[in-house]
Image (cartoon, helix red, strand yellow):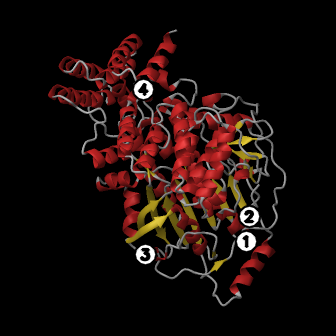
Amino acid sequence: MPTQHLRCALAVSAITLCLGCGTSPNPSSGRLLILGLDGLDPQTIDLLMSEGQLPNFAKLRQEGAYGRLTSQKPLLSPIIWTTIATGKGANQHGIGHFTATDTATGEEIPTSSLQRKVKALWNIASEANKKVATIGWWATWPPEEINGHVVSDHVAYHFLFDNGLFGEVEGQSSTTDDNKTHPPELFKAIQSKLRKPGDLTATELAPFVSLTDEELAQPFDFDDDIGHFRWALATAKSYRDIGLDLWRTEKPDLEMLYIEGTDSSSHLFGHLFRAEGLGGELAEQQKKFGSTTEQMYLFADELLGDVIAALDDETTLMVLSDHGFELGKLHDDPSKTRDLRRVSERFHRMEGILYLYGNRVKTNARIDGASILDIAPTALALLGLPAAQDMPGRILTEAFSQPLGSHRVVSYEGGTSNNPSRPGADTNISQAQLDHLRSLGYLSGSSGTPTAGPSGIAGSDKGDRNLAAIAFAAGDYREAAHIYRRLIEDDPDDAGLRTSLAGTLGAMGRYEDALVYLNQAIEIDPLNAEAYHNRAVVMERKGDMDSAIADYGTVLRYAPQYEASRQALIRLTGRADPRGVNTQAEAQAEALVQQASVAAQKANYQQAMALLDQAQAIAPKYALTYQYRSNVAYLKGDVPAAIAALVEGLKIEPDNALFATNLARLRSTVN
């Protein structure tokens, strides 16, 4: 369990000791409001702003400082927003994924404040006698005892029970309310501002979606696009209203307000953003949800205007997002996402937005090279508090018209906790959070056996994988290898873990050891593109170019979009086609197959199949045609035709593991 609260005397004493070492205190501070808009993309902001659609963002750019905020991989919200709130990376704060494991029950649960190993801004400011408020921020349940108010991230799920979309039955309480906010009585005080999904009227929804009365009356389900979006919009409106009310009435020195709906709408409907030439089910989806993502950007601008109107002359406003989002991009292989949704963090971009406005902020100033690690040190400086030496980020001094304090305390960690006991589980809400994350493609499958921490909450295997990857990126190969070996012990049949461990060993120069794990990974999963790529890299470093070329080619055979292998193959052979186009007929067929792929991405299946017919007629032995024919047939719902295409493909390439695997999967659906 993280240390959550030092007595004020201890905090003041620590700072006094530091200030007595020849440094001068930070200048007097004003108030600070941090507005977090999940997944808001800077390129899309620039586009809409150029069209005159975002007047409040334009105001911040003209009258404040702005830039892009560089994030860190993995681009997963609990990790990044905790890094923003603590000024420390996942290797320090300990949150590595969306979920953890309750060691008492073995169940997968959403990540929580119990996992965080370090103090957040609200802890540090509270200990310095600053009044604080946090609303909806990731991993804030159970709420910590601070000098102010916490509206935890569980509040948004409360109104899904017991009566689903339209809230609770009068007189009934579906789950305890006293562990969702601090202080507990705050929950009752904010009831009037909690918008349930079913509270949203057709008029409120009209700018975002085009739906019939029957569609609007559907029962709530996170797997349903309509219900999921209504939840996201209702949550955004609720947190906005609660945040503004707390800002005006309680007057905190620091408020941190988080809005998730901008990310959910992008995951659900971002592929439709200004997309052209869509057909079939995508065209039908576009009729209903084609403007949803753009309208959420306009909603974010309107929300920003409400926040600006609530500021006083002593306030600094910081607006940021944890990452960007590639909008209007269709999946390369729509057969892998049959429900046409986005998948995981693949479409996230590394850069989010950053705007500073108000007290002490320069006008029309540019911020270059800002990182998510810089937010906490800058926020502390604005509050008149020193950053810590164990916070690797910098203070963004170039954004301000007067100097901010530059001295640092050694650390804010240590002390005693005011929350020694672990609260009871929020079972229903935890399940709702998991359903929400699965519906966006963040979660799938089962977890391994993580190692328990002192809080009784263990990191999930996915979280430990991410922590290992972060250690690898930081050059701490020994720590990465240690984590991967432990995970392999728990799940010896996971080919991905063996591939990752091999990559770590390769980085350490242990090529023979790496090859052992890579060969094992390929034996477990013959379609593991990363394993083939890593083995090719090792073979190239050993000087075995023929083997390297063969493995790079296998990668592209099974994963045509694997760019690193494509570039390596071009570098070594001058061409990127692993199979080799041997005749003019095959070259023509290849071009037709690529056209068919584009048509299928847009759900123009009839056009795609006609192009594949032409390709097959021109070059009957060109195997790739049968792979795409199977995909398109599957998308059309014609499983027998999809099976027949793979059977023909295997006659041409009997060793094609992709064909064999897909054929087995398809046959299992009809047996």
Give yes or no for contact between labels 1 and 2 (Cβ–Cβ under 8 Å): yes
Q: Earlier in the sequence, mark 3 or mark 4?
A: 3
The label nearer to you, 2 versus 4, is 4
Query: What's the distance in space between the residues labelled 1 and 4, CA to CA?
Result: 61 Å
- In-front residue for pair 103/586: 586
Q: Is residue 368 left or right of residue 247?
A: left
Provide the residue designation for mark 3.
362
Q: Is residue 9 left or right of residue 522?
A: right
For the residue marked with disc 1, what is the amino acid? Asn
Query: What's the distance in space between the residues labelled 2 and 4, CA to CA?
Result: 58 Å
Q: Secondary structure at mark 1?
A: loop
- The residue depicted at 36 percent of the width and 46 percent of the height is 545
Provide the residue designation for mark 2.
147
Q: Is residue 477 above or below residue 237?
A: below
The label nearer to you, 3 versus 4, is 4
Provide the residue designation for mark 4.
658
Q: Is residue 318 above or below residue 313?
A: above
Q: Is residue 572 above or below residue 655?
A: below
Where is residue 548 shown, x and y percent of the image? 38, 43
Residue 469 numbered tag: none
Query: What's the distance in space between the residues labelled 3 and 2, CA to CA?
Result: 31 Å
Q: Secondary structure at mark 4?
A: helix
Give yes or no for contact between labels 3 and 2 (Cβ–Cβ under 8 Å): no
Q: Earlier in the sequence, mark 2 or mark 4?
A: 2
Provide the residue designation for mark 1.
129
Most distant residue in the top direction? 671
